[in-house]
Amino acid sequence: MLTAKELALTGPDIRTADSELLEGLKAGSLPAFERLYETHGGRMKSVAMNLLGSAADAEDAVQEAFLKVYRSAGGFRGGSSVSTWIYRILVNTCYDLMRRGRRRPESPLPAEIALAPSASSDHSTRLAIEVALRRLDPKERAAFLLCEVEGFTHREAGEILDVKENTSRTLLFRAKRRLQRELSASGAFLPPEPA
Amino acid sequence: MKIDCRDLERVLQDAGADRELAAAFEQHAAGCAACGRALAEWRQVSSAARTLSKSWDSPELWPRIRQALAEESQRGPVRERESRGGFGWSWLPAASIAALFLIATAGLWVFRNSGGRDPLTAHWQTTKDPLLTEKAVDEVDAAEKAYLASIEKLSRLAEPRLAGASTPVLVNYREKLDVLDSAIAELKASIDQNRFNTHLRRELLAAYQEKQRTLQNLMKEVKS
């Protein structure tokens, strides 16, 4: 589950805390990396898990992303916010893992993985979306996961995916349209509630 | 506002930014079963998406990361580590080839332009001064902007191909572009420290040209 600290630091608070981290990251300070992990580790695991489909791969990707942050923090020039820069490194690391094909097989979620709470009636739709997501183009999938699942704005998602804000909107629209069509065809949606 | 079923795509793409449009379509959907269902399904996708966020305890992950960071720091300064191939040996051949190519291209470019045909190098041809004047810097900045506009256009076209790169040729193009991007980033960082350095400006322009050419070749490759 998310720690109290992770829950407390969301949205603008996270960005403020990020800028304070930068100096520590540039200096290679271990406590700064620990703070980075405490603040973003949970969300990073979730993004990687949804992109890669395996908890073990997600943890590998997060670890690799931290090493890349360590190696490149000195060269970070502030073209984007620190948090979007970190997630950009993470998403690219996930793409690299997908490309290298060294991933563990996709598996059902382990019992210990907690999902965000939902009405039980949404469960079948959620499962159907998880399956349909795997068939999306990687950028559309990433836009959907970042904006709809993790709550990033289009500006942030654009920075993470290295596309313009409007491109992020288009990617999300396409992703949702494909998911809607696929789920509709497979009868995964709940019947409309009677008026 | 006159609204009918043909406005569905526009309304969904607009995502509620135009409130008047959204309200008018909502009214239409209340009396149209197909549009009503489409809207309800659209909302179900969003509502289910919010439940896809996952969290789990990983008590061993931070210790693992801390250990990896400690090992990394013992290997020496970042620059030294990168030059030893710290990002993975698989990069080394591609990076070396691309670096050699870049140097050769930069050399050729300087040589080719020594005849005085390229306006970008007009200043460099009339003076041996290693520093540019303010006016020359403005001209070079303008030239760089033109390259950047062209590169951005090509990058937009190439992006979908590279994102789903599955053939060795496309993967090589992607790696070469990554190497060029890091070279460009390093040169820009150095230029930020010294905007008037002629040599750095030349190298940056050569890198832009190489990136433009690579993207053009990639598009040809995709079309063929």
Image (spheres, rainbow, N blue to C red):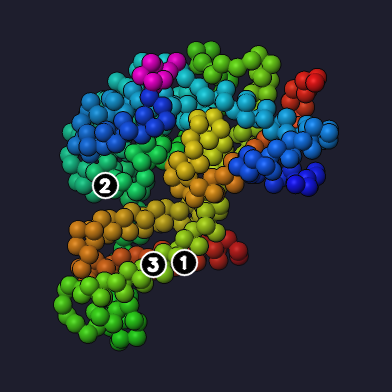
What range is drawn magenta here?
A1-8
Q: Is residue B92 above or below residue A180?
A: below
Marks 2/3: CA–CA distance: 23 Å
Residue B219 horizontal/vertical position (percent): 54, 63
Three-letter amino acid code at disc 3? Answer: Lys
Which residue position is annotated with label 1?
B150
User: Which quarter of the rendered picture does the N terminus of chain A lie within?
Assistant: top left
Q: Residue at x 80, y 19 (%)?
A: A194
Mark with earlier residue (3, 1): 3
Q: Magenta stretch mostly in which secondary structure?
A: helix
Establish whether labels 3 and 1 are both on one chain.
Answer: yes
Q: Is residue B127 above or below residue A160?
A: below
Residue B200 horizontal/vertical position (percent): 24, 66
Give SS at disc 1: helix
Q: Label 3 crowding class (10 Å Cα cut-off): few <14, some 14-19, many 20+? A: few
Three-letter amino acid code at disc 2? Answer: Gly
Three-letter amino acid code at disc 1? Answer: Ser
- Mark linked to residue B87: none
